[in-house]
Image (cartoon, rainbow, N blue to C red):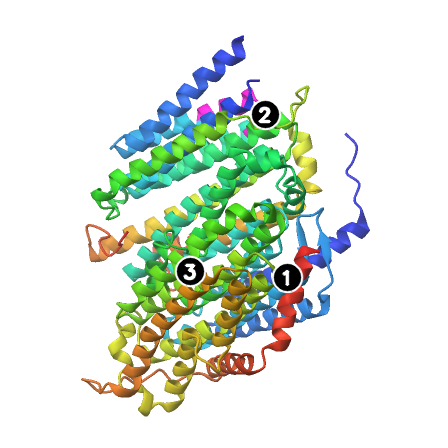
Amino acid sequence: MAPISIDAAALLTSVQSIVPEIIVVATAIFVLLLDLAISEEKKHLLCGMGLLGIGVALFSVYALGQGRIEGFSGMIVHDGMGAFFDVVILSACALTFLMATGYSEWEGTHKGEFYSLILLSTSGMMFMAKGTDLMTVFLGLETLSIPIYVLVGFHRNRMSSLEGALKYFLLGAFASGFLLYGIALIYAVTGTTKIPVLATMLYDPRILASPLFLAGTGLLLVGFAFKVSLVPFHMWTPDAYEGAPTVVTAFMSAAVKAAAFAALIRVLLVALPGMQPVLWKVLWGLAVLTMTVGNLSALVQNNVKRLLAYSSIAHAGYILVGLVSGDVLGGQASLFYLLVYAFMNMGAFGVVMLIAQKEDEGYDIANLAGIGFKYPALGALLTLFLISLGGIPPTAGFVGKFYLFSAAVKNGYIWLAVIGVLNSAASIYYYLRMVVYMYMVTPDVEVAVPRPPRILFSMALCASAVVVVVLGIIPRSVLEIAERSVLSLLM
Amino acid sequence: MMDPSAYLLLSGILFGIGVAGVVVRKNVLIILMSVEIMLNAVNVAFIAVGSHLGDVTGSVFAFMVMTVAAAEAAVGLAILIAIFRLKETIDITELSVLKW
Amino acid sequence: MTGPADVIFYVLAALTVGSAIFVATLPNIIYAAVALLFTFCGVAGLYVLVSADFLAATQVLVYVGGILVLIMFAVFLSNRISSVKLSNPVHFRLPAAAICLTLFGVLAYTAISPAFVLKQEITYQPTTARIGELLMTRYLLPFEVASVLLLAALIGAALLSRPDRPDIPRPDMEEPK
């Protein structure tokens, strides 16, 4: 057999297209090794090391720019969209690390494995968001999921943590099966797993009409729906979110959602625009169901983590509204909302983490009582994040929802927009309920003393708050970047 | 070789059995085994189609699926063992907190 | 027209499906694990039949030699693991069965419908070399991502299943002086 010839130039371009991912994986391995070398008191260095790595990775995304770099014979691409999601995912990861500085001290997660797994998961998300072949998307998905299963069960001495992990694992593996079978059926009809090639195949009406292909697309959607927790595939979300260490919950809610939506957007907008006439009905139904069930379930929750879990389900529904439209406007709105959502949701989780003194019992809503006046900074921050989640101006959450629903209206899905706005109004009830607890309910017992925040932790909260406010007032430039990102996809 | 649709039918049946096993059974290990059956069904489809098309993509994909299956099994069993450890110390008979 | 290959296909298909049904229905977990062995072997046989030699070998090594042994190990390590049950309420069974039947119907329908995949006359050749070559060229990235995934699984599994207090040295894990 002839030796394999290596095209050095192509290999160099390929490596270039995954520089941020390489940096993240290298940091993960370095953190793991560093863990062995340093003493117990200096474990916070691990966190700093991780942050440094994330910073370098973010810089490399910036340095690569928005140009299109295809790598590894069409397996992955670094385009505007990839860069956008790299930034979202890395920001979420950075916020997680900043919060972990405090959280790890309180809950004993200062371990090399903890940080290393978060970084490995991050790399998986980035591969998934940039993958242009269903094989890359699938492997990215698994690389993001497997560390998350473990991280959810990180508190091995708490049953709820392990149960959440088990449930997430079983349903995640189940969902992977559906996703894979969908890919297999699509491959059976088209003979390819490359997303751009699929797009050209779909000009053939015989393929569009093939039941095998329809079934494959359906199963693929089911697999994705599990991962972004769309109703009726959301059963794992509340338990996994509640059981997981809170800092992991925050990470999951922001980053996993962003990565899974990135891949979904790529598949829907690039590979399946030909199916839009059929697809929009399915997505329409899923979006309405997800928003409504998520919000209605959130109304009755008394555990703050569970409440935010259902709210995150509802938010997946809002983001899906942008995808129903299936055009640049909708895609742009979804991208913008995913970015904003990452900051406001992680901010909310961050404040809640400070108020709760310990895992499990600390997250009862009654625990918020009286916080508002006693600790004005915390109260103000949480209020800001909650009104942003509720979509009240002048926050970024309002701008995001405005663009999502106006994209739906412009494409003629007026009912969808109406249902979305109604849902959004209903959601304000439970967000404000938390605010009411903070400011208007007199606590039965003494006001809970929040954990003293660390400097880095405060930085994470302030950064999130700044993003939420600034994007609420001057969203223009970020919206333009989001638009360019979606356009880069369609080129 | 037979027509690939025979293999696809077989893989559909296997997949259905796997899904049924996951949904109906209560035992965690059996659910895990049923998931493995689902993944095997996927692999049968990939390999039969790939072989029919004379395309190695199917085989490579199946290879990746096997890798992932092994990794998932390892992590899943590790979670189970951790649960078992905790049960031994605090003794709960059922995972009742877990709501479907 | 049925040749010997077709007969073998039907035998293997019956073996695979039959044992898979046993896995999904047998109440005894050890029997189920043994039935799973037959499913895996039957699938490996099917791979040989479509001349996917490398995958057949991998199937035996990874599934039978790895995953199944892992599951058996978990079963024997403690009988009580097998008693870990999910509160999967019985009233879900009927809808579940209905969903499965529907799913099966859809899949069966799609499988026998004309898929018009391009029919080519292929002479079967060993695939191992070709797969190895592609893993180093076209599929280099998935190959590397898979290695990251395995690293994550390794760290995770070790983290979850190691003894509770790793900071306290245990006498049985120390090296003899």
**Label whose residue precedes the other's in the sequence (1 or 3):** 3
Whether pointer 1 and pointer 2 mark residues with C-beta atoms closer than 8 Å, the reply is no
Q: Which image quadrant: the N terminus of chain A?
A: top right
Relative horizontal placement of residue B79, taking residue B58 as reference (left or right): left
Q: CA distance from mark 1 to mark 2?
A: 43 Å
The circle drawn on residue C53 is 2
Label 3: state its secondary structure.
Answer: helix
Q: CA distance from mark 3 to mark 2?
A: 38 Å
Crowding at mark 2 (Cα within 10 Å: few <14, some 14-19, many 20+): some
Question: Given the image, on which type of amino acid does mark 1 rest?
Answer: Val
Q: Can the viewer see residue B16?
A: yes
Disc 1: which residue: A486
Look at the picture and state if B6 lies above or below A64.
Answer: above
Crowding at mark 3 (Cα within 10 Å: few <14, some 14-19, many 20+): many
Question: Given the image, on which type of amino acid does mark 3 rest?
Answer: Leu
Look at the picture and state if A217 lies above or below C124.
Answer: below
Q: Can the viewer see residue C158?
A: no
Label 2: state its secondary structure.
Answer: helix
Host chain of mark 2: C
Host chain of mark 3: A
The image shows residue A382 at horizontal and vertical percentages of 39, 81
Q: Residue at x 27, y 56 (%)?
A: B86
Q: Residue at x 37, y 75 (%)?
A: A353
Q: Which segment did they paint magenta? A: C41-55
Disc 3: which residue: A151
Question: Given the image, on which type of amino acid does mark 2 rest?
Answer: Asp
